[in-house]
Amino acid sequence: MENTITYLRQVFQERSIIIEEKNKRLFTEFCNQANNQSDVNKIFEVQAMVIKNWELFTRIADIQKQSFLFPNASVGKHYEHRLDFEKLEIQDIAELRFTGLEEIGLAYDPETKVISGNPTTSGDVRIQVDFLLKDQADLSKYNEKVIVLIINPDPKSLWKDLPSSKEDKFWKEDNVELSGTFLDKNIVISSKRGRSHANVGSARDDDFAYQNYENGWGILAVSDGAGSAAYSREGSKIACEFVVEYFSTQSNDPEFVAFDDLIQDYHAAQSPEINQQINRFIYNELGRGALQTHKKLESAAAGLGIAFKELNATFIFSLVKKYSFGYVILSFSVGDCPIALLNKDLNEVNLLNHLDVGEYGGGTRFITMPEIFEPAKLQNRFSFKVVEDFSYLMLMTDGIYDPKFVTEANLENIDKWNTFLSDLKGANPDEAAVNFDYDNQNIAMELSNWMDFWDSGNHDDRTLAIIF
């Protein structure tokens, strides 16, 4: 009854109703009446309910205004974000549901409180969140909140794939791939136009050529036309085709015939004299092939009426022959394209050339540069290797080397090469795989598909030639 007396006295006072001394007992009797006490209790209940409703109302408003920061997503890339109710201080939410997630490739799991999936749409996506608080009486009336999820576009989609024009001077196919035999082994090659060219509709600069000669030698050449040279795509083409043609006649030269005997002597018993003769042969014969390639390009530039440097191209080639005791591999290189030999057990790699790379970039050299033929510099551009057998001989342009190996030092790390082989065989985000089975008729296309890999900042032409 005390609550009733206190409450009514306060109410009467607010309304200027004075309880005179003579009516005090009467007021007490009034407050003691059951119906009046019941009415006052009802008022207390209504007040409590109004206060609770106000608190609920403001709490809902607070949550609606609260910022739910979700990490940015990317189209085509798996997304997963767990809502931490405790960190967000929303433990009083009884139920949460999202509208619009499925439309963009995402879903919400109320058990784990995780939003996950593979976004299909880019942009600032508005998503409706409906929630119920634990204290809500009406469980059918959800409260609405809107969040914005930023979904970045697939970087690949930002690049155009414009066809090159066959009307362009020295046009060549955007993508070329082939497979075949090389001596007693197989060969697969893919040369693919880079995204930087595809984005503007220009042609591929890289090129390659190979041939098996009747006398048992085989040659494989790869060239990367310089992006800064207007007609480098023609320079790379001329270089590869010419060196293959050049050695098709030179390989029957008496010097080459005599080399067979020299190699047999080398295998039987090495000596300083034999080593000197081999080095002299390599310097003379491969050096002459490189120099004649240089002169062919110089003549082509003059005939076209263009500056020699407009045909700038890096250039590598390897001559290979199988003998009874194993394989002899002779190589020449200028520029930043690696030649690598992996042994049969895949526990050793030999980098058969030194790359022309500057400490701060721009240090590469081209077959069109006369200074590379200075005797003191030229002798470092050759290599000679004799092995019983090998698993892979690879020649590649920097469109492969830069994203997959990054630094020259990694090219001499067998672990990096085994990672690269795993990548080739399907251990990559695209799960693109190359099956190196001798009977695989689709290997060229598989290699071409693998070379579509994405690597931010590396969009140059890609050429990879593999003898296996």
Image: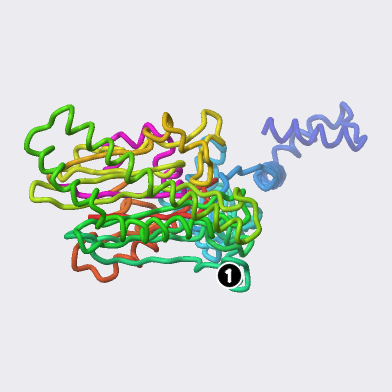
Marker count (numbered)? 1
Magenta-colored segment: predominant secondary structure: helix
As rendered, which of 227 and 273 lies closer to the eye?
Answer: 273
Please give left or right for residue 237 compared with residue 123 in the image: left
Q: Which residue is drawn at 48% across and 47% down?
A: 314
Where does label 1 land, which residue? Answer: 163
Does residue 22 show up magenta in the picture? no
Residue 413: image location, x then y, percent = 30, 34
> Could you tell me the amino acid type at mark 1?
Pro
Q: Which colour scheme is used?
A: rainbow
Quarter of the image that includes the N terminus: top right
Residue 248, compared with residue 386, is above or below; it is: below
As rendered, which of 337 and 265 lies closer to the eye?
Answer: 265
As rendered, which of 262 and 9 lies closer to the eye?
Answer: 262
Quarter of the image that includes the C terminus: bottom left
- Outermost residue to the bottom: 167
> Which quarter of the picture shows residue 128?
bottom right
Q: Residue at x 62, y 61 (%)?
A: 304
Magenta-drawn segment: 389-418
Residue 331, compared with residue 179, is above or below; it is: above
Residue 163: image location, x then y, percent = 58, 70
**Mark 1 falls on what kind of element?**
loop
Mark 1 residue crowding within 10 angstroms, few (<14) / some (14–19) / many (20+) = some
Residue 109: image location, x then y, percent = 44, 54
Residue 208: image location, x then y, percent = 41, 58
As rendered, which of 285 and 225 lies closer to the eye?
Answer: 285
Q: Is residue 90 visible?
A: yes
